[in-house]
Image (cartoon, helix red, strand yellow):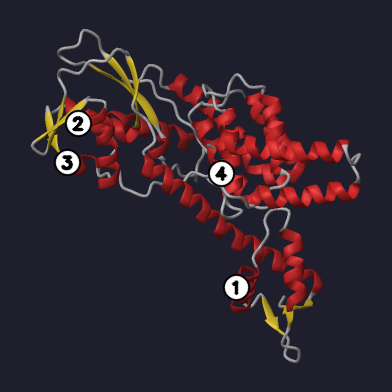
Amino acid sequence: DPKAYVECLLKTYQKYAGVVAETFKGDSKFSACLDKSCREFINRNSVCENSLKSPELLARHADNLLKKGGKYESLDLEESLNQIITIFRYIEDKDVFQKFYSKFLSKRLVYGLSISEDSEGSMISKLKELCGFDYTLKLQRMFTDVNLSKDFDKGFQDVFKNSDLKMDFSSLILSTSAWPLSVPSCNFNCPTELKKAIDKITGYYNTKHSGRKLTWLHQHARGEIKASFPNSKIPYTFQVSTYQMAILLLFNDKDEITFDEIKSETALSDDLINGNLSIFLKAKILIENNGKIKYNSDYKSKKAKINLNVPIKTEQKIESEETHKNVEEDRKLYIQAAIVRIMKSRKKLKHVNLMEQVISQLQSRFKPKITDIKKCIDILLDKEYIARDEVEKDVLVYVA
């Protein structure tokens, strides 16, 4: 539980910070000891085996606080954000926090879940004050994209308000460089009902921006479909993902369908089909009989609107693993960039001194491992950005 974890860290910090302030009158040596101890127990403790887990849990707690409709809405939000910053100051792997925070912010913005733009801005300002402009650049760009998208969408709606589109449809146009949203890893045959709207938006976008290409991220899209069942007096509204929509719309043409037919029609992977079918079967919207999937004509619910767009557990686990993997890839680039900057400035430097300077440059963002620095030096040697001195083999030389 991210909330319980952060509260435990805060309680421990506040206890000993109080001792230093009251008993030792804020003595600088005791304050320094407190900071050193905080860095240790916040990054490595019985809950987090390594320093990578603590920033992830802190980012998840921030997400829960800033998410609309969350169970923590009654808390003093500004005070809670300040408490996150108190812990964040001691986080060693600030790049891990940034990755997860960016991922969660993107979802809040895409799905309209932010509790308020002011609160989001307040948190970004706090991070910017601590870590600098570059740390929050992409976070701020996300807000710019969302606001520009609102203008684009209004223009689209005005142009196509009398078109033959039989649905309400809106889009977000996001810049690839700022958003941590991956391109779909699987194929997908978009339902005919959606494809018409997508084609119109793409055409309209091309009239505004020549030379640019839109890539549709169907895995992040969502919508609502109205569903009527023979034995129910009222129609239901299902809140679904695009993939779920594609599966359910197949039942407009057939009462029952096989797994292979779903796969053929949608081109989705087995895991995605199974994951979403399990949600429909659990909700009793669909029923399984002799290897075929059939819509449940006796379906009834006390609610008129049902949210079926819930995360699949395997997706959550994969997302966390991918984020950590992305951090590792980014770190290699940061280390290489730091090596090149240092060598370009110094021209000639001993191997051991170069490693010390790389650590010094990057430790505000993360603490690079010696083994990773050595690997990056080898990469740059291979690329001939740097070379070994012909006389002193422990000395590296910058190659212009």
Tag 3–tag 1 contact (CB < 8 Å): no
Q: Which quadrant would residue 366 be assigned to in this image?
A: bottom right
User: Mark 4 or mark 3: which comes first in sequence?
Assistant: 4
- Mark identifier at residue 259: 3
| Label 3 Cα neighbours within 10 Å, binned few <14 / some 14-19 / many ≥20 | some
Query: What residue is pinned by disc 4?
Result: 100
Q: How far apart are marks 1 and 2 (CA)?
A: 52 Å
Query: What residue is drawn where x is 75% and y is 37%?
Result: 15
**Which amino acid type is shown beneath numbered disc 1?**
Lys
Q: Is residue 233 visible?
A: yes
Q: Residue furthest front?
A: 23
User: Mark 4 or mark 2: which comes first in sequence?
Assistant: 4
Q: In this view, does 347 lie above or below 115?
A: below
| Label 2 Cα neighbours within 10 Å, binned few <14 / some 14-19 / many ≥20 | some
Percent across and percent down for residue 79 are 71, 27
120 vs 75, nearest the viewer:
75
Q: Can residue 145 be seen in this view?
A: no
Percent across and percent down for residue 253 are 14, 27
Judge left or right: residue 192 versus residue 124: left
Mark in front: 2 vs 3: 3
Query: What residue is pinned by disc 1?
Result: 375
**Which amino acid type is shown beneath numbered disc 4?**
Phe
Q: How far apart are marks 4 and 1 (CA)?
A: 26 Å
Q: Distance between the residues labelled 3 and 1?
A: 47 Å
- Mark identifier at residue 250: 2
Q: In this view, does 375 lie above or below 301?
A: below
| Label 1 Cα neighbours within 10 Å, binned few <14 / some 14-19 / many ≥20 | some
Query: What residue is drawn where x is 39% and y is 30%?
Result: 222
Percent across and percent down for residue 10 are 69, 37
